[in-house]
């Protein structure tokens, strides 16, 4: 097996659930006085993570949480984004921008751009994995785990609808 073919398990299904639960409780604490928050998941895996956070918050939080999906063209040199709901629902609300991995920061930077023309109460970010390789001046408010990796390594986040075979690998 070549070095590049090796997979090192970083988080298993149970550990991912624990990280998501912890982040949900942190979001509850940060937004306890809100009437409604918008959880904006960046497709594809950020959206899966957002759905799971919403499900937990729906059980534990006194506020309403609304899910929004953002689809970005990450290869474009300018912001090209599509949301599944009208962006104006975010007006004067707390928005939680969710993605699976923070690597260079480009995806989150594009995600911020979606909300530039809407006055928000606050904007927070959530990632499952923070890789600490930022090219953009982006930090996250909530991270499941921070990994110090080398640039040639790849983090593979496997999230699926059932959640049974979730895992995070370093390759």
Image (cartoon, rainbow, N blue to C red):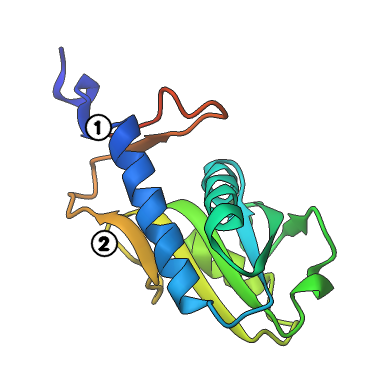
Classify mark 1: helix, strand or loop: loop
The quadrant of the rendering that contains the N terminus is top left
Residue 38, visible in the rendered structure: yes
- In what quadrant of the picture does the C terminus appear? top left
Q: Quadrant of residue 48?
A: top right
105 and 124: which is toward the camera: 124
Is residue 113 toward the left or the right of residue 139 in the image?
right
In 3D space, how far apart are the residues under numbered discs 2 and 1 (Cα atoms)?
16 Å
Report the residue marked by disc 1. Answer: 171
Left or right? Give the position of 141 relative to 118. Answer: left
Q: Are marks 2 and 1 in contact (CB under 8 Å)?
A: no
Nearer-N-terminus badge (2/1): 2
Q: Residue at x 64, y 86 (%)?
A: 121
Above or below, 41 against 9 in this view is: below
* Residue occupying the point 69% across, 56% down: 67
Q: Nearer the viewer, residue 61 or 169?
A: 61
Q: Give the labeled residue for mark 2.
A: 132
Nearer-the-camera pick, 76 or 138 = 138
* Residue 143 image offset from top left, x and y in percent: 34, 60
For mark 1, does the 10 Å Cα neighbourhood hold few (<14), some (14 to 19), or many (20 or more) residues?
some
Q: What secondary structure is marked by label 2?
A: loop
Q: Residue at x 51, y 64 (%)?
A: 108
Residue 165, compared with residue 20, is above or below; it is: above
Query: In this orientation, which residue lies closer to the viewer: 1 or 66?
Result: 66
x 31%, y 34%: residue: 14
For the image shown, how many numbered marks are present on the structure? 2
Task: Please indicate whether residue 66 sits to the left or right of residue 127 in the image.
Answer: right
| Disc 2 packing (10 Å; few <14; some 14–19; many ≥20) | some
Q: Which x, y percent locates residue 16?
A: 35, 41
Where is residue 30 shown, x and y percent of the image?
Answer: 46, 77
């Amino acid at each position: 097996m070549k070095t590049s073919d090796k997979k090192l398990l970083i988080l298993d299904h149970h550990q991912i659930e624990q990280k998501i639960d912890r982040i949900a409780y942190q979001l509850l604490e940060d937004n306890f006085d809100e009437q409604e928050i918008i959880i904006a998941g960046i497709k594809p895996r950020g959206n899966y993570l957002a759905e799971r956070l919403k499900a937990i918050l729906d059980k534990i939080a006194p506020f309403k949480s609304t899910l929004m999906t953002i689809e970005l063209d990450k290869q474009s040199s300018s912001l090209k984004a599509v949301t599944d709901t009208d962006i104006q629902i975010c007006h004067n609300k707390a928005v939680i921008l969710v993605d699976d991995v923070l690597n260079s920061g480009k995806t989150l930077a594009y995600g911020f751009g979606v909300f530039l023309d809407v006055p928000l109460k606050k904007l927070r970010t959530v990632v499952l994995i923070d890789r600490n390789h930022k090219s953009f001046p982006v930090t996250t408010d909530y991270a499941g785990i921070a990994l110090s990796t080398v640039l040639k390594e790849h983090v593979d986040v496997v999230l699926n609808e059932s959640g049974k075979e979730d895992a995070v690998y370093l390759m």
